[in-house]
Amino acid sequence: MIKIALDAMGGDSGLGTTLPGISHFSKTYKADDVEFVIFGNGISINEYFLQNKCACKFSVIDTGANVISSEENPIHAIKTCHNTSMYQAVKYVADGDADAVVSAGNTGAYMVLSKILVGTIDGVLRPALVNIIPTKKGKTIMLDLGANTDCTPDKLHQFAIMGKATAKILLNITNPTIGLLNIGTEKMKGTEVLSHTYDLILKDKNINFNGFIEGNNITDGSVDVVVTDGFTGNIALKSIEGAVKLVASLIKDEIKLNLLSKVNYFLGGKGILSNLRKKLSPSLYNGAPFVGLNKVVVKSHGGSDYIGFAHAIHTATELVRSGFVKNIKKSLGEISE
Amino acid sequence: MIKIALDAMGGDSGLGTTLPGISHFSKTYKADDVEFVIFGNGISINEYFLQNKCACKFSVIDTGANVISSEENPIHAIKTCHNTSMYQAVKYVADGDADAVVSAGNTGAYMVLSKILVGTIDGVLRPALVNIIPTKKGKTIMLDLGANTDCTPDKLHQFAIMGKATAKILLNITNPTIGLLNIGTEKMKGTEVLSHTYDLILKDKNINFNGFIEGNNITDGSVDVVVTDGFTGNIALKSIEGAVKLVASLIKDEIKLNLLSKVNYFLGGKGILSNLRKKLSPSLYNGAPFVGLNKVVVKSHGGSDYIGFAHAIHTATELVRSGFVKNIKKSLGEISE
């Protein structure tokens, strides 16, 4: 059995998203070997599952209404959060009582708690949030997506190493190409930190380094792994999400605008667009693991819907199944040899 | 007459793009009151216009093959670039011999040269690259798009002021809402520079401040003006461009994939998509003015095609027609009163 600890209180709409997400996961994904331990307001959780089915075995650990809000400073939060659903869920995994944890709560607090309780793999400076991005040619791994606002060259170099290990596991690419995100491809472009990082990665013979790449290269499939700091990565990822939504919305406007477009839509456009939605829906990419930790810790987007939360749970179960942490440790060992 | 100085040698493909761009502009846009002074390789330029029509009056100032390459460090470039097309074109405008200048060359060098030769408006700390971004609700102004990699809070605050002035002129909005780009909307999110900038803008009673916004808010129409440093702005803009291209490419793949989609496409999808292309093509947004300079200085994207270069010329002529610099000066004066 795969045992997953779930923080049910995190995210913009808390239980309103996480509980339908749990139910949706149990109906939609391979779940017969998955068991949940749900942390949150016990009364509400039990009430929900009296009315709605959860096909998975589950137990509830009542942490009341205690939650780390998204506004809270992570450093402040971790001092006073011992009774919250997030703390208890992370601790449960850290103690070896579950295989993975999923939360949609405060990213900074989740990261700090995971570092302290779960711990980082030997030699890892900072864990990074990593995820798969759809591209023209297939899929790309990108990190960091928001865990580390400020990054030194040695941390970014390590993101390249961890990105390589992640690409090996998630994309099945043994020698992935790595690009460093910048505002131009020329060596002299960008910040001093990026210039030093460039030199550092270039010297690393184990990295198949493509040099600097630009924002548009994230989704054109130029590289297998995009390395950047958490500030830039978060902005780039959300800019991409926003642009995809913009295109979808303009298509809808276009259809509403005139009769000919309406006819066009029902004749043919609808099929094309619904297939497109299936490929690009952010819910189907939701669930970013922290790479560099001793356990599987998955972050669900705070604003994600229940379909997205279900996908984040799916990501966690798949990472456990594939031996993600063991493989990352192995890859890091091989690379640093 | 509106006189535009054109650096014909700049950009990834130099004359191969700029000359067809000039020709395209003269055929496509209102050009009867526009006159060009073209800086570059005289022989090639004259040869081109013997074979291809330019409906506008133009003269050529021969600067040979001298060009500032995109790889060159701007500070180094400006010491040795006096004989290049970019330097001569910018100097021409600075001397009052033309109303505006357009270049697709090295952004950093263009910015530094313009600052030195054309000069900044009194009180402006740093000029910024600004442009219009299409959104769900219409259009948004965004700055800086790549001129200033590192920004202090006082510079970012001034970008908000210049962004307001630009929105007044380009979008006809007198009291635009301003958002500061960050990795979360909560006050404690992001970097120290952003936190200080937040306080600074909040105190400014002349700014209609919406607080922090995220990457996805750039294109959802949440605010009229997006303020950010040139590093983040450049990455966000290019990420958006890449995402739009990704969607277009996935639609094409979808059509190729199966017969039903092909039929769908010819029945209806084609019309919808071609209208969409007309709305989102990067060429139709190409041409970003520097705001804060004493003359109209427009940057064309280095990788833009000739249609984009023509649009950048169009932007320059429209800015001259609307009295952009005079109005920015006036707005800055009013705001800082």
Image (tube, coloured by chain):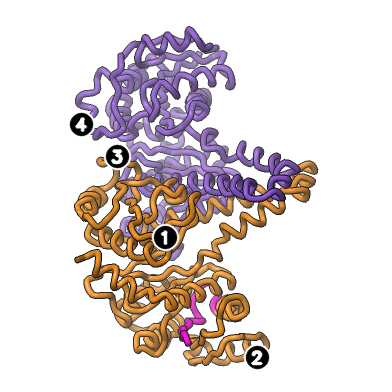
Chain colours: A orange, B purple
Percent x, y for residue A192?
23, 48
- In the rendered image, which quarter contains the C terminus of chain A? bottom left
> How far apart in space, not on screen, are marks 2 and 3 (Cα)?
60 Å
Magenta stretch bounds = A1-14
- Under tag 4, what secondary structure? helix
Q: Which residue is mark 2?
A: A50
Give the amino acid type for the residue marked by disc 4 in the picture: His
Secondary structure type for disc 3: loop
| Labels 4 and 2 positioned on one and the same chain | no
Tell me, yes or no, whether the two marked residues, 4 and 1, touch with CB atoms within 8 Å.
Answer: no
Q: Are tags 4 and 1 found on a single chain?
A: yes
Would residue B189 be seen by someone viewing this image from the given angle? no
Q: Nearer the viewer, residue A29 or B297?
A: A29
- Front: mark 1 or 3: 3
Left/right placement of residue A17 relative to residue B297 reads: right
Return the residue at label 4: B76
Between residues B305 and B31, which one lies in front from this camera angle? Answer: B305
The front one of A201 and B177 is A201
Quick check: is A13 in the magenta stretch? yes
Residue B278 lies, with reference to residue B251, above or below; the image says above
Instruction: Provide residue B71's location: percent of width, then percent of height.
Output: 28, 34
Mark 2 or 1, which is nearer the eye?
2
Residue where numbered disc 3 is placed: A186
First in sequence: mark 4 vs mark 1:
4
